[in-house]
Amino acid sequence: MKKIIYLPCVLLFSFLALQLMGQTNIQPGAANTNEYIKLLKGKQVAVFANQTSVVGNKHLVDILLENNISVKTIFGPEHGFRGVADAGEKVGNYTDPKTGIPVISLYGTKQRPSEDDLKDVDILVFDIQDVGVRFYTFISSLQHFMEAGFSQKKSLVVLDRPNPNGHYVDGPVLDTAFKSFVGMQPVPVVYGMTIGEYAKMLVGERWIEQKALDGYGEMKSTGKEPLVVIPCLDYNRTKVYSLPIKPSPNLPDLTAVYWYPSICFFEGTVLSEGRGTAAPFQMFGHPSLPNNLYQFTPKSMPGAASPKLKDQLCYGWNLSGNPGEARKKINAQLHLEYLIEAYKLFPDKEKFFILPKSGDPRASFFNKLAGNELLMKQVQQGMSAEAIRKTWEPALVTFKSIRQKYLLYQ
């Protein structure tokens, strides 16, 4: 009897161990030090990084310093170099206390390095964990970083990282009339590319500014490689990649990362999107919704000092739970059902979407997130999620054809 019980236990343990081994075999480009340290030797380096720029428990900046690389400047994105600032919070410049290296914020008074910031720099390095969503601002920061560097004829090394939402492409493609820092290029909400692949597309499709393209071309003509992508190891789009460090304060786990593309639309409405709770982008609701729905109260906390509807009892939904179940439920598509249902249940529909002081819906934050003015109108008109999704198809087909040219992984 003992043997009969023992064998299934061993098989189960072995299966789980293999699953864990498959997960840990995935390595970001930053782990492939042999490929990029040689590019940086003897040069003055500027690094764009945050708290996710790690290999194991070691930060990229520390790895570079241990390899005698001269790190001249660190640039930090939204949430700062250490990743503790609130969403949208302006971050100032300072000196990193651990290394003594100056940190320049590119999410404060400016969004790109100045000529003066780069005058003593030879080469740029970009290493930040992205989540593959258009309005997650790191791809906008990447574009500005590329443009600043190429304009001054400085090469860029992108240390690629897996995209946890890289297994699908969906959502409305941005209309460039609605271009902003939360959406700069004609890509869908979920674009199915790593940040290295996205960098290649920016150049290949000539989506970066002309001055940068001119600098890129001049470097190419002299035999210099302007853009080098150090790929991930043992990664493909079928693999589940659990992030070792949360990419921002309000994406605390993989379930939040999976739901983020769908639930972030509530940022453009009067509903709480779950900031100030234990499950941001998994809980969402409002005090005016029916009181038989899930109850929660947003509170002030690190990363959400002043959340929407702070200290107010809200009624809505709770999608938190097992990430595997979340991924299965999402089923590789953007979910509009909760947005549509919340609008139907909301009593004062004219106040559901947050409008600017001008009252012009075109300038609303919701339309910036959607990348068009059509989605708001479709929800207001009572269109079904299926009908809305059909309107995305022509632009998605075009984008997928463009995307295919730049993919580095299966």
Image: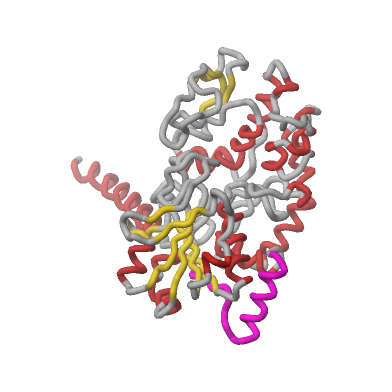
Q: Is residue 57 magenta?
A: no
Q: Is residue 265 above or below residue 30?
A: above
Residue under the point 52% across and 68% down: 118
Image location (x, y in percent) of residue 146: 59, 65
Q: Nearer the viewer, residue 46 or 117?
A: 117
Instruction: Provide residue 402's location: percent of width, then percent of height.
Output: 71, 63
Residue 405 in the image: above or below residue 341 = below
Q: Residue at x 42, y 31 (%)?
A: 301
Question: In this picture, which residue range is highlighted in magenta?
Answer: 209-234
Q: Quadrant of the N terminus?
A: top left
Residue 225 visible? The answer is yes
* Residue pictured at 60% horizontal, 73% vertical: 152
Residue at the extreme bottom of the image, as rendered: 222
Q: If the image is split into quadrants, where does the C terminus sit?
A: bottom right
Q: Position of residue 103 (x, y in %)?
A: 43, 57
Q: Is residue 225 magenta?
A: yes
With respect to residue 256, does 167 lie above or below? below
Q: Which image quadrant for residue 207?
A: bottom right
Tell me where residue 299 appears, x and y as whole percent: 45, 25
Q: Is residue 127 left or right of residue 372?
A: left
Residue drawn at the location 69% of the way across and 36% of the way down:
366
Residue 324 shows in this picture: no
The quarter of the displayed image where residue 53 is located: bottom left
